[in-house]
Image: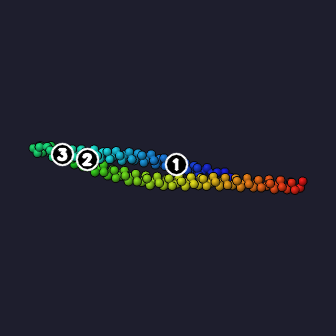
Amino acid sequence: MKIRACWSALESKAEQKISDLRAQTAQAEQLRDSLLASQQRLEHLYEEYRAQSAAADTSKGMSDAMNQRQFMSQLLTLRERVERDIGKSTLHLQTLAHRMQQAETERLKMKTLSENDRLAVQKHLQKREQHSMDELGMLQFNQARVA
């Protein structure tokens, strides 16, 4: 009886899946951090333009006021888009965490099965060895009795 290679192969496959998920998680966290930084920059830029608009002289031309309002509207649209992307990124990270937990459970299951198989083979070999030792003992006993 030999140790089956399938369990260790399945365990290594599960470990590979975990390392892939870790890489995906690191990439997703980097993306989320980038989005959060973009959100902060947009907030700062919007507040800066709003303060400039409030401090500016009201005698600005109509086209300048329209351009400023349009630009601020575009900033708000960008901010909403970044917030949606942050939400998607957070949801993706939660999904990855769930998949990581499942992969870790699968890896532990394969490790346990591999260990159980190894122990079963070891137990089988010990039984066989004990049986051989018993036979040898009986043979020696019978030979000593006959002689």
Residue 136 lies left or right of residue 17; in this view the side is right
Q: Residue at x 47, y 47 (%)?
A: 20
Element class at badge 2: helix
Dot 2, crowdedness within 10 Å: few (<14), some or many (≥20)? some
The image shows residue 117 at horizontal and vertical percentages of 62, 54
Q: Residue at x 74, y 54 (%)?
A: 130
**Of callouts 2 and 1, the N-terminal one:** 1
**Of callouts 1 and 3, the N-terminal one:** 1
Tag 3 and tag 2, C-beta contact below 8 Å:
no
Q: From mark 3 to mark 2, how far is it between C-alphas?
A: 12 Å
Element class at badge 1: helix
Dot 1, crowdedness within 10 Å: few (<14), some or many (≥20)? some
Q: Residue at x 32, y 47 (%)?
A: 36
**Of callouts 3 and 2, the N-terminal one:** 2
The image shows residue 42 at horizontal and vertical percentages of 26, 45
Q: From mark 1 to mark 3, how far is it between C-alphas?
A: 54 Å
The image shows residue 108 at horizontal and vertical percentages of 54, 53
Res 43 label = 2
Check disc 3 and give the amino acid type: Ala
Res 41 label = none
Q: Is residue 82 visible?
A: yes
Dot 3, crowdedness within 10 Å: few (<14), some or many (≥20)? few
Seen from this angle, which residue lies furthest right? 147
- Mark 1 sits on what residue? 15
- Mark 3 sits on what residue? 51
Check disc 2 and give the amino acid type: Glu
Check disc 1 and give the amino acid type: Glu
Tag 2 and tag 1, C-beta contact below 8 Å:
no
Tag 1 and tag 3, C-beta contact below 8 Å:
no
